[in-house]
Amino acid sequence: MTCDGFRRFVDAHVDGELDVVRQAEMEAHLRSCAACSRVVAGRRSLGTAVRSSEELYFRAPARLEQRVRAAARRSDRRRLVTPSRIGAALAAAAVLAAAMFLWPPGSDRSWSDRTSQDVVSAHVRSLMPGHLTDVPSSEQHTVRPWFAGKVEFAPPVVDLAADGFALVGGRLDYVAGKRVAALVYRQGAHLINLFAWPAPPRAGETAESASSRDGYNMIRWTRSGIEFWAISDVNAAELRRFAALVRSRVP
Amino acid sequence: MGARSSSEAFERALLPHLDAAYNLARWLTRNGDDAEDVVQEAFVRALRFFGGFHGGNARAWLLAIVRNACYDWLRRNRPAEAHEELDEEVHGASEPSPTAEDLLVERVDRVRLQRALEELPPAFREVLILREFEGLSYKEIAEVAGVKIGTVMSRLARARDALQRQLIAEGGKR
């Protein structure tokens, strides 16, 4: 691969958007080209600068949710009192809306099982005010002992602050019919929930497998007798990096 | 299924993405109050079109509507900005993008970064916001912005080049 060829795809490379073959070619080129390595370093430094600044993510003011709910209900009511043609359209919309919750979302990589559904629900619930952590602490030696006696295993708590994922705290949660440990990490404006619970006996180790559901990226794997699920709205490449870091730090 | 449950389904599908909607609108209008108006308008539109939403990625679907509402708002209120030309032909989307070399962005403060982002043309700004802040895939960004995946890639490359150069140039002046 030439430098021109490399630079044409450098953004897709940094963003984890290339197929395996092209990705391997890019990495081979990088190993032998200092100039292109600097280009990649420049891109990564920019990405880190943009994503690590929480003030650059503008969260909706609380009153906006009330405004939106009120406006949606007003417009919904207006539609209902208008004649039958619109009524029929609305009924069709209602059927589709119902279908949306009966079937898993359309992504071909979605998991449809109950566990992934529970993981999404637990993640969304955790983002509501006051639900994020039971033990807010960036100190792994505070978070880990907190789980003693609350779950029937010792969840591994790893410090990834140097890699851009700050520990926010821990929480008890309920997923797939069991009490599980939830560890919360933050990257810039994005929160990552890492759920952990004991894997079934003799489940063995499984490699990371990734999916998305309802616009959230998820990765699950099994290691040292513990099943892990990471979920977040960070991009898929960053979540993979997070999962690989956790996996490499768990003995 | 009555009106109550249809508006509940709507809220359940879309309200979790209110922050994403507001963040995009805030970056495109560059003003908090205007962003609130645009997001409210976008949710009303989303409700109208909710029947056309067949499940799938609710966030990308909503963001596409927010984006359109933003451009409509810009055309009404700041026509010059909405029509900022990209000149993709002149700058050659077909040739390899000129990639900024040796431009490490270090210790840049929030105010400078925000200004540099806001100075990008909206078409560049939006792909960067959707990528870096929302973590959307190129395919999702292409759907939201109504362009090809290759265009997403070249716009991201040029947006990042411009941003790196801007931040380094300003840093040098200090």
Image (spheres, coloured by chain):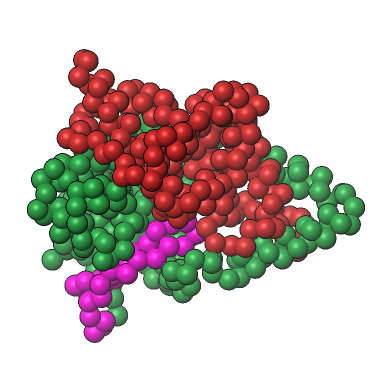
Chain colours: A green, B red
The image quadrant that residue A69 belongs to is: top right
Nearer to the camera, A48 or A33: A33
Q: Position of residue B114 (x, y in %)?
A: 37, 27
Q: Residue furthest top?
A: B174
Q: Does residue A142 appear in the picture of this structure?
A: no
Which of the 4 quarters of the picture holds residue B100? Answer: top left
Residue lying at 20% horizontally and 36% vertically, measured from the top left:
B101
> Residue, x 41% and y 29% (percent of image)?
B120
Q: Quadrant of the C terminus of chain B?
A: top left
Compared with residue A101, is residue A17 higher up or lower down, i.e. above or below?
A: above
Q: Residue at x 30, y 35 (%)?
A: B161
Judged by its main secondary structure, the magenta piece is strand
As displayed, is residue B27 above or below residue A203? above
Residue A18 on image: x %, y %: 31, 59
Q: Position of residue A158 (x, y in %)?
A: 19, 55
What span is colored magenta in the figure? A201-227
Q: Closer to the camera, A41 or A61?
A: A41
Residue drawn 59% across and 34% down? B71
Q: Quadrant of residue B139?
A: bottom left
Q: Is A224 contained in the magenta span?
A: yes
A119 versus A33 height, above or below: below
Which corner quadrant holds the N terminus of chain B?
bottom right
Between A194 and B165, the residue placed more toward the observer is B165
Q: How many marks?
A: 0
- Viewer-closest of A1 and B162: A1
Magenta segment includes A121: no
Left-right relation of A52 to A58: left
